[in-house]
Amino acid sequence: KDVADKVADAAESVVEKATDALTPQIPGAPGPAPAPLKEPTEPVPPLPPKPDQAAPQARTATGADTGADPHVRTQQGAHLTTATGVKLRDTDHSLKAGSRGPTLLQDHHLREKITHFDHERIPERVVHARGSGAHGYFEAYGTAESICHAAVFEKGETTPVFVRFSTVLGNRGSMDTARDTRGFATKFYTREGNWDLVANNIPVFFIQDGIKFPDIIHAGKPHPDREIPQAQSAHDTFWDFVSLHTEAQHHTIWNMSDRGIPRSYRMMEGFGVHTFRLVNAEGVTSLVKFHWKPKLGVHSLTWEEAQMLGGVDPDFHRRDLADAIESGAFPEWELGVQVFEDNPEQVFEGIDLLDPTKIVPEELAPVQPIGRLVLNKNTTNFFAETEQIAFHAGHLVPGIDVTDDPLLQTRLFSYVDTQLSRLGGPNYNQLPINRPHTEVNDMFRDGFHQHAVHSGVAPYKPNTLDGGCPFAAGADLSEEQTKAFTDAAVRVAESTKVRENPVSYDDHYSQTRQFWLSMSPVEKEHIIRAYTFELGKCYEQAIKERQLQALANIDPVLCAEVATGLGLPAPEPTVPLTDLAPSPALSQLTGGPWPGDGRMVGIVVDPDGDLDGVTEVRTAILAAGMVPLIFAPHGGKVGGLDVQRTFATGRSVEVDAVLVAGSPVPAPDARPLREEKAGAADTPTLDPRVTMLLEECFRHAKAIGAWGAGVDALAAAGIATDAPGVVTGSAGAEVLTEVQTLMGTHRAWERLGAPVA
Ligand code: HDD
């Protein structure tokens, strides 16, 4: 007994010390200071939301945020209970026959707790397993009313939405910054039922017919024997498939471009890919392609940044999205449509609108804005919302219909089917995140996880016993109900059953080349390096050679450069090269300058440097809607300022620009690095970790600003002050203004070696 008491006392004092140290520090938090993270003895209110962007790492508020959803349960009810609501006195000790005796089978709470835990995981999505989501709203401009009668497009209509972004290939725990396609799936909870626009950040797809989806995904996923590599396309099976199956080449060149490594979900375009059919109030149909255009422009990481972030912060995109929303820098997109006449051929300017490997250049059919999407609320519970949301390309509303694109047609089957295994039964639409915000009278009954308690005796039609209810919508009912889903009465050409594609689907290269021709020199350089890296990671020579053949059919320079990197001869093209007019809209370097909402600005601080200047600059960064991150030799505070990153914990890849406010000398914990790098005799004047940070920022063409002693730091790090994108001055505020202008173009592109076109 004595020993047990002593152990318990010791443990208590360790916990007390640890929890004291963990007291949350939320600078400028409104209201009373939060209670220390000791276990309270009675319920306390949850933490306040993060007060500003300066605390991206602070804890998120929990518990009370129930929003409008009656299903949200708080974590902090007053008393702990079993799943059946019985109050519990103890959840830390299993019921035993004596304190050192065997555990008793009769301990229902123990078994219930462990059993529930054992079943906490559900199968991850077979593709798009890694993702991140947020709530928001869509506001219609009314500009689509003439071509579509859906309520979601009525002028001024505001529709709640949930958006989930994702990568395709990696598993749930894989890094955000892998080179991959990104999913951009939006659920619109319209007053006429749910509409899902299940889009990607690339406007074309790997395959033209859904029957090949398992093939491309098996090829892209890790090799089945050792299950490596994770979340990568840089391996033999992927390039084996896409080099044999050349309709994938258009999608692949997008993957190899900077689009494959976005800077942020907030800075991606989204594309519905397929051509959809819209119906107006008169029943007239049009064909459209949906485009999401980000307010912040389309921007990417460099390949080195993406790789480094995979280790430094594998949650980079997830964190970026949540932090931006939490700090009030709400991500925003415009939804636009390219509109085409619904002619029997479904061809526009020679482009087959049913071929999902083809785009229609924006210069030929401008994207017309029809509404605005704003994401303004983070999830309360990742599992309940982001994990359990179930999208389906067939969740359509009256006025929005499909076309015969064979890829879309297969999707109409696949999404319901996959939810059955992922969410364990047919009632997944009753989950809070999937429930329509409108009345549901579906007559579906029973099944696993049935939440509804249906009354009535006649779940069939026609019936008399439930008064004939529910009725099919018809002309005799109110206007609201007559807007029922009506399949567009499209003529289907008389035909023979075949397993084949139209001839137009055979052109795999003209638009792939058009993409290449539309790139600026810097972007071309990145594409060459991406192919060289990915094919360089392949083992089989035959696969590399076959992909080089595909590159030769896209462009001889592209092929020759990649071949040189691989140490292989460049083949001659086997198809005639077609020069379509370049589409400037495809380049990420057109447009701008772009707003800096939520951009991260690192400030390197020397405790002996200009801290007043740092305070002023920090306030100005916050006022501009950006996030200042103070990098200092040690944690805690420097002067009165909270330190967000130490030279040991922070890396350059976390910031979009860096300001240098001092020239910190090497700290004691940097000594081993210093000796390794410079040799014992040669003592550097600048902390080598700051040198590394500045070198990396320079290499990644980030804006760099310095004032006062910070200018000496640049010299010590070997950064030329007259290089493009480097600004020096006597005061922080003026340097920041110039840095902000530089950030408007995302990078100092000239520094990347190739001139901007
Ligand atoms: Fe798919 C998920 C987008 C073709 C089968 N798809 C999924 C997600 C996105 C897309 C964004 C993630 C949704 C989420 O966040 O939960 N998929 C696309 C696009 C495609 C496409 C833009 C082509 C234009 N997909 C496609 C085909 C098939 C599927 C051809 C099957 C034949 N997709 C699925 C799926 C997934 C899915 C297996 C996995 C998890 C899920 O549905 O809910 O059903």
Image (cartoon, rainbow, N blue to C red):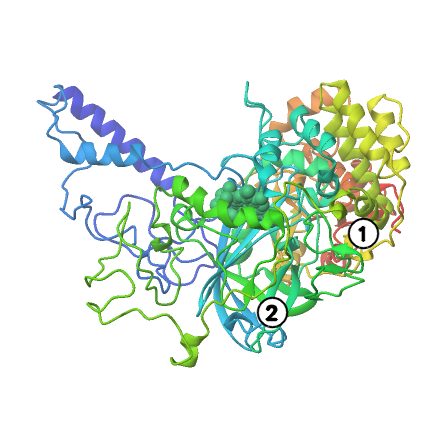
In this view, the mark in front (2 or 1)? 2
Question: Is 123 above or below relative to 354?
Answer: above
Q: Position of residue 400 (x, y in %)?
A: 55, 65
531 vs 323, left or right, is right
Of residues 4 and 172, the one drawn nearer to the viewer in this rendering: 172
- Tag shown at residue 321: none
**Mark 1 — residue?**
728
Label 2: which secondary element? strand
Q: CA distance from mark 2 to mark 1?
A: 42 Å
Does residue 154 appear left or right of residue 725 in this picture? left
Question: Which of the 4 image quarters holds residue 98?
Answer: top left
What is the crowding at mark 1: few (fewer than 14 residues within 10 Å), some, or many (at least 20)?
many
The residue indicated by pointer 2 is 371
Q: Can residue 416 be seen in the rendering of this structure?
A: yes
Is 287 placed above or below 446 here? below
Q: Amino acid at mark 2?
A: Gly
Q: Nearer the viewer, residue 242 or 596?
A: 242
Q: Which quadrant does the N terminus fall into?
A: top left
Q: Earlier in the sequence, mark 2 or mark 1?
A: 2
Place of residue 376 in the rendered image (x, y in percent of width and height, measured from the top left): 50, 62
Q: Amino acid at mark 1?
A: Thr
Asked if marks 2 and 1 touch (Cβ < 8 Å), the reply is no
Dividing the image into four equal quarters, which quarter contains ligand 1? Answer: top right
Q: Position of residue 44 (x, y in %)?
A: 27, 54
Which residue is located at x 61 percent, y 45 percent? 497
Do we see residue 319 in this rendering?
no
Q: Residue at x 44, y 44 (%)?
A: 417
**Looking at the rendering, which quadrant does residue 271 occupy?**
bottom right
- Image position of 314 (left or right of 233): left
Q: Vertical placement of 5 versus 417: above or below?
A: above
Q: Is residue 185 left or right of residue 493?
A: left
